[in-house]
Image (tube, rainbow, N blue to C red):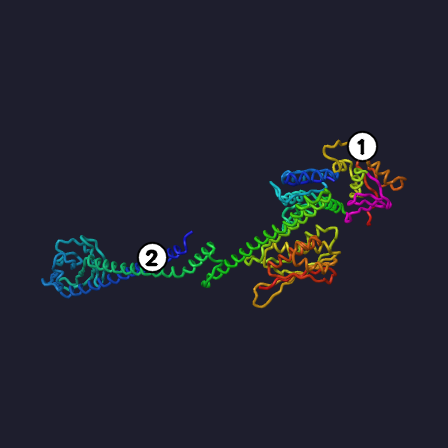
Amino acid sequence: MLSLNARQLLAASLALTAFLGLTGASLDQAFRASSEAALRERLQAELYTLLAATDIDRKGKIQLPEDLPEARFSQPGSGLYAEVVSNDQKQRWSSPSLLGQKIAFDARLKAGERRFEQLPTQPANVYALSYGVSWETTARGAENYTFTVAESVTAYNAEVKRFRQILWRWLGASALVLLAVQGTILRWSLAPLRRVEKDIAAIEGGEQQRLAGDYPQELQGLTTGLNTLLDYENRQLARYRHALADLAHSLKTPLAVLRGALTATPDADELRRLTQEQVERMNQIVGYQLQRAATAGRATLQAPVTIAPLLQRMRASLDKVYADKAVDCRINADNTGVFYGDEGDLMELLGNLLDNAYKYCKAKVRITAQPVSQPLHHRTGLVLEIEDDGPGVPADKLRAVLARGVRADESVSGQGIGLAVAQDIVRAYHGTLDIRVSTLGGACVSIAFPTR
Amino acid sequence: MRVLVIEDETALREQLVSRLKQEGHVVDAAADGKEGLYFATEYPLDIAIIDLGLPLLSGIEVIHRLRAAGKVYPILILTARGSWQNKVQGLEAGADDYLVKPFEMEELLARLKALQRRAAGWTQSVLHCGPVALDTGAQTVHLHERALELTTFEYKVLEYLMLHAGQVVSKTELTDHLYEQDFERDSNVIEVFVGRLRRKLDPDNTLQPIETLRGRGYRLTLPRSAA
């Protein structure tokens, strides 16, 4: 992909070229138009002087003094030419400068008519201004004459060329300056991005843990997001490490029991019973630790999960599994209750708690989910209550169950591990889990996720 | 009953098959999803045990397809991934219950029995039909509160008839669900067992619990009743 720098530079250069090109072209056009107008005006003036110097005798012959008002009319090839011709072609006067030149001045104009045109000649074209005049001669009455004054384009072209040179030199110089300025601006405004890059390299190199320092407002979303992700990754890594260590340590006890039993227990039945027991224990440990490690924990970049449809799905699933019990499960939740986090975590949490409720209830389960809002917090919290009409959790077990999973569930079996897993998930989202006595008569597990 | 096991792990599949046969069930086994789906749609099954992580065709897909093909028998899923997302997905696809590996074989057998009973419309584990009470858990039969001595095969025939109480059960159906596929199919054997059952359930010939419908099969006439 094209770098930001290259994109900016390319876009700016294209815009600059277009802008300067158009400016140059229009200035050039304007200059040419005004030079042409000036030339025409000059020719007009020459024409009037010529007209003033002209005399036409009785026979209609055109008379001009030897000493012409403009010296360039008298020098051959001077570039300034004049011709006076009667419209019937009988009388013609050409300026001495036209000597040896062949220019087809073929305009024959009525009195008062005017024509300005460019005529092709060698070595250079000429601009010609013609003017029709009616002259009273005593012998023949009024006669029409056409006066033409022409100037070679060479001078005009040279002038235009000089102007163009100056124009493009200036435009080029300003383009270079603008590009240089733009490059500097670019470097300056992209500097924070380079800083981010350097910081990330430092994180990769293990020199720092997160993006430190001040970033402009536009980058803060990105850098805060990156920091959140980094923190999340770090926490996740720490949890994996702990889970692995916990797993290894907690498996050592049953392994030690088994090893001891191998040498110390001669009775086969007793050994079988012991193995069975320890295998079951190891299975629970593995299940519990696996669950703990799989908990995604708070992930801030996810879309919230609407809780009501999920509750209905879970209820449909559990109704199937506990079809024999025909549990009456009521859900009090509308679509305002949302959970900011991983859907898998939420399902795990609800699954464990609902499974317990279905398992231990006599006939009724009640689920309540309500959003909690607080001013200045974007994200609503959530209070979840799962109640049943079963025997409830014995008070002496409660503390043990909530404190640490694996130990407690050896005696409580199912319920303990479910609660311990739920407790872990709730903690990962900075929530709280509490167990009370429900108005239904059994346990009421109450979970609160904070607003943010 | 006739059970289909779809499980790709050879050791576990063999354990399941031998244990189920030992329990007196007719067992079909498949090692991948494709073969499993074929058996699941072609054989007259009572129940299927399906592992979710299967080669060729996932367990979820097998369940979807066999339900789409109109099969209504209960399905028990086995999964190594115990996550609820997984379980709910399986149950929503059409399974009726789940077991997370590793599991106790006894637990599996109990779940199968419960599923079969539920599929036949019984909610309790003890089936009551008139004076006969059959405990599917303990595999015992009581007549007028007195224990009745039945052989394994007699018990199986009675259990099948009681699960389908009020319905006509053909001899072929009984052989299909209670015999191994390669077992010699001799309908006389069924007649003999039904005859013995009649004598044991109705020694003084007043109850007439099993009706014979010529050319169609048998029907348990005793009414289903609550405990």
Within 10 Å of disc 1 (Cα), the crowding (few <14, some 14-19, many 20+) is few
Percent of width and height locating residue A66? 9, 62
Q: Is residue A212 visible?
A: yes
Front-most of residues A428 and B205: A428
Mark 2 vs mark 1: tell me if same chain. no
**Can you tell which mark lies on residue B188?**
1
Front-most of residues B135 and A79: B135
- Where is residue A452, by image quadrant? bottom right
Q: Secondary structure at mark 1?
A: helix
- The magenta stretch spans residue A144: no
Side of B117 where B102 appears, left or right: left
Q: The residue marked by circle 2 belongs to what chain?
A: A
- Where is residue A420, by image quadrant? bottom right
Q: Is residue A57 visible?
A: no
Q: Which residues are magenta?
A: B122-150
Percent of width and height locating residue A395? 72, 61
Type of amino acid at the residue the image marks with label 1: Asn
Side of A165 where B116 appears, left or right: right
Q: Which residue is mark 2?
A: A17
Can you say whether A397 is above or below B223 in the image? below
